[in-house]
Image (cartoon, helix red, strand yellow):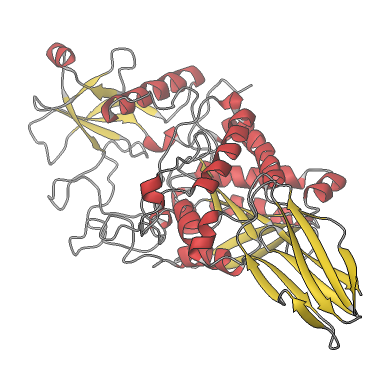
Amino acid sequence: MLPLLGYSQSNYPSYQDLNSALSKLTTNSSFKESTIGLSYGGEKIRLFKLETSSQPKPTLLIVAGVDGKHPAGVVSAVEMLKYFQALPGDSIQRLLKNKSIWVIPLANPDAYKRNSSTEHWLSGNARQIDNDRDGRVDEDPTVDLNKDGLISQMRVSTVSGNMVADTLYTNILVHAGQEQAKGGAVYKLYNEGIDLDLDGRFSEDGEGGVNIDRNFTYNYNPFISETGDYAASEPETRALLDVLYTNPQISTVLHFGLGNNLSKPEAFDSGKANARIVSSWLKPDVNVSEVISRRYNKLTDALGKGKIIPAAGGSFSNTVYYHVGKYSFVTPVWWINGVADEGNASPEKRIDHENKVFAKWVADQQIEKAILPWVKVEHPNFPDQLVEVGGVIESAKNNPPVPLLKDAVELHAKFVTDLLDAMPSLQFEKSVVTSLGEDIYRIEVSVANTGLMSTYPAIADKLKLSSKFKTVCKLSNSQKFVSGKRLELYPTLEAGQARTFTWLVRGKGKVEVQVGCPSAGEQIIEISL
């Protein structure tokens, strides 16, 4: 059951407390900590490896905290690490027998360090940037007009407005229809702030830095606020890419972030999949997405239907699939039950629906500092108009009070276990050796993928970056191939698919056969002829 009383948005741990909690995890022998790099502000980006040996095994990588606006993902990753730490020794040994779990709980430490001290959750790292591209840096920062310690919304009463107060939840605004506009005050809605540089925008260029989740290479958008000077300009971005490109055993990436391709699977678009620049998951990979989505929805059914959040340009999750060639799934972990999109509604109606569901949740759960009453303020940009500050604290929509994350984290921990089981797994039959006479032997090695996912996504065969499925047959000095080669490369082995590899070898002695790929597992088989 979810707690019902008096929780506030202000209970996310401090940066120091978060790091202290992470440091306590390494007391478990199955947990190993390393650093993948430093943030722009010089903070360590920590990686926790859950594995029973240093021998590379197919790995699930979990990443959180890429976008600083999502502290719920960071706390969820830390709590999940605690969940696995608390498992009995035999359970963790079984879980990690043939697989590994790696977790980067805070990919953007600069953002969390800054934001947790202010309760104003901004996306970017510590770099100072010109968000509005006007040649000046941080000249239009956030301004707390009513001095309540929070940055909320600002409504300005004007006949040209398009928003009205909701009839039931009066502290939120909804888009005005013709009938609504006749009956009461009409407003324009802004973020709380002042237009100090007189460009028509409010507090658009202050602290916040580069949003790491807009700085990756796939579909990168230059000259947009928070995306950085160029793709992968930030040390945090490059650190994550280095982990992905230098560890071929990483099979699947699960991102706790502001996106969602798990509640609804990826869709196949033939035109986009066959274009020069691929922008649709390939058909075999969509099949995998559908399988994983069904399992995810079954396990998270108690949370309700999750809102579909499409990935933006330069996102981490899309880059993992389209440019690195790994299975890539993203979820916000927590959402308000009932907030999922309403069919084919217009963008305005979707926003109104989301805000009304949010307002009901805030009232039912008695959440503080999530929706504020409107307070009149004097505003230098609107000297002769009624200006009020209040309404929705936007970050509260995706970041509930920490105690309310508990149920979602436990369900997602079960999903992680399920996802680990679904990852590709190679099973080998006993090799068969047949003597054909005249000192010639036929060697047959058979392998099946018993997982629910291919050994690697089909997109990886297009990218030619992943370590392919291969066989390496090493002969003794006195032996020679009659047919077959020392090294052969193969396309991905799909779920449930099997292959048999055959060589004809002349001469007695030992033969060593290596079969598999890092993302699904490899085995070395020794054969005596």
* Residue sitting at the far bottom: 477
Which sits in the foreground, 497 or 190? 497
- Is residue 43 in view? no
Is 185 situated above or below 160?
A: above
- Residue 98 shown left or right of residue 273 in the figure: right
- Residue 116 shown left or right of residue 200 in the figure: right
- Is residue 3 in view? yes
- Residue 20 shown left or right of residue 481 in the figure: left
Is 422 situated above or below 187?
A: below
Report how many numbered discs are placed on residues in the image. 0
Horizontal and vertical percent for residue 183? 15, 11
Horizontal and vertical percent for residue 113? 49, 54
- At a point 17% along the width and 50% down the height, the residue shown is 196
- Residue 314 shown left or right of residue 187 in the figure: right
Which sits in the foreground, 234 or 287? 287
Screen quadrant of the N terminus = top right
Toward which corner of the image does residue 403 lie, by quadrant? top right
Toward which corner of the image does residue 479 lie, by quadrant? bottom right
Horizontal and vertical percent for residue 512? 83, 74
Is 374 situated above or below 81?
A: above
Screen quadrant of the C terminus = bottom right
Which sits in the foreground, 377 or 241? 241
Horizontal and vertical percent for residue 453? 64, 47
Which sits in the foreground, 273 or 177? 273
